[in-house]
Image: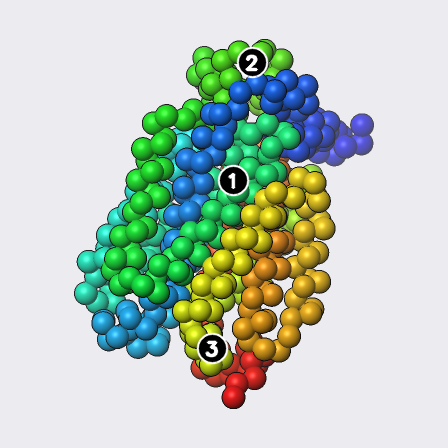
Amino acid sequence: MAIKEEHGNDGLNENIREPLMQGEKDIADEGGGSGAEKSSKGKLCMVYFSTFVAVCGSYSFGSCAGYSSPTQDAIREDLSLSLSEYSVFGSILTFGAMIGAITSGPIADFIGRKGAMRVSSGFCVAGWLAIYFAEGAIPLDLGRLATGYGMGVFSYVVPVFIAEIAPKNLRGALTAVNQLMICTGVSVAFIIGTVITWRALALTGLVPCAILLFGLFFIPESPRWLAKTGKGKEFEVALQKLRGKDADISEEASEIQDYIETLERLPKAKLLDLFQRRYLLSVIIGVGLMVFQQFGGINGICFYTSYIFESAGFSASIGTIIYAILQVLVTALNAAVIDRAGRKPLLLVHELALSSVPALAVTGILVYICSFSAGMGAVPWVIMSEIFPINIKGAAGSLATLVNWFGAWAVSYTFNYLMTWSSYGKLYIKQN
């Protein structure tokens, strides 16, 4: 009673908080288990197909991130860019992603998860075309900025969409596929970037966008978003399509509706509401994981891999290809075990592996990317999709993604300068 007397309807909010948090943990079955468990026995072809379509956005994300590493020397030579100008080109991607992060939650809540993916794809297409036709630094940077905006939206909406359509028993693995496809996009860009021109590599970035835009015509919208926006008929059709035409969705649909009704009793969350006591722990965890993920230096390694190998006196092409293959293999393994091993053990792998990295640059980078892909690469995004109650998911997800991309910008922009200043101190490289 003391809570009610001091804070008005905060007592009501606290009473509702537990089912909300439980609902987020059971994101696919909306506060229960039986409905999702029954549906998981039905045909889930549409769940898999919808996940495939969505992770084309993740692949596009990876293509954008991996583009600058194999093309650095060629772009600088063809367009006569200085080191400073290329550093701007490499890092402005993450600045665009910060803008995308700010708007991703509201966009996904307003026009739906599919609508947000269409917007993101449009920006990526425009960006790749601008890069392809660029004859100077300004159009090159504008194209990179546009693809960065698309990345920022994809980084939020894809894992959220997958988590909202997946049954509970598949949620972790399917959400981890998001990171797998990001790594695949990066790796493919690394590998084919060693054999084709930088302009041709830009055109390859259009392929996943085209597949995504086409595929969106055939997959349903997130049932949870449809229920939240009051589209009852569309909600049931989408849920039935995802669970199979013969699946009994009545119990799961009822649970979702009850959950949404409980949610509507809460006031609409604003950005400042995230710092209220009842949400603070989840915000600290979500934002904190993004800070640790980015300031581990992953984007500095990813954006300038070729340059690092060259500085170490190792073949840039061979090193990049090995890096790309290992990244995909370890991330695929992570996707297979994430639901069995749990979230925390995989996060700890990152720290344990980094402590054993040898001083040699090549070995160090390869061990680093393996440990990152197994832990801090994928798990923070999975946790973010689970930890926030739905009434603050848009605002909280945008904040966490914004912090992530701010860290990515800081690391990627300063990396070349720090390498020039002291490659030894930056990466503990002992050069001959």
Mark 2 / mark 1, whichever is N-terminal: 1
Q: Calculate the distance from the C-alpha at mark 3 to the C-alpha at mark 2.
A: 56 Å
- Residue 172, position in %: x, y? 61, 38
At x 33%, y 42%, the residue is: 209
Of labels 1 and 3, the one closer to you: 3
- Dividing the image into 4 quarters, which one contains the N terminus? top right
Residue 366 is left or right of residue 52, and the answer is right
Q: Secondary structure at mark 2?
A: loop
Q: Residue at x 58, y 53 (%)?
A: 330
Residue occupying image coordinates x 42% and y 51%: 185
Which residue is rendered at x = 45% and y = 12% of the image? 233
The picture places residue 130, in percent across and down from the top left corner, at: 23, 55
- The residue singled out by tag 2 in the image is 247
Q: Which residue is mark 1?
A: 159
Badge 3 element: loop
* Residue 314: mark: 3
Amino acid at pointer 3:
Phe
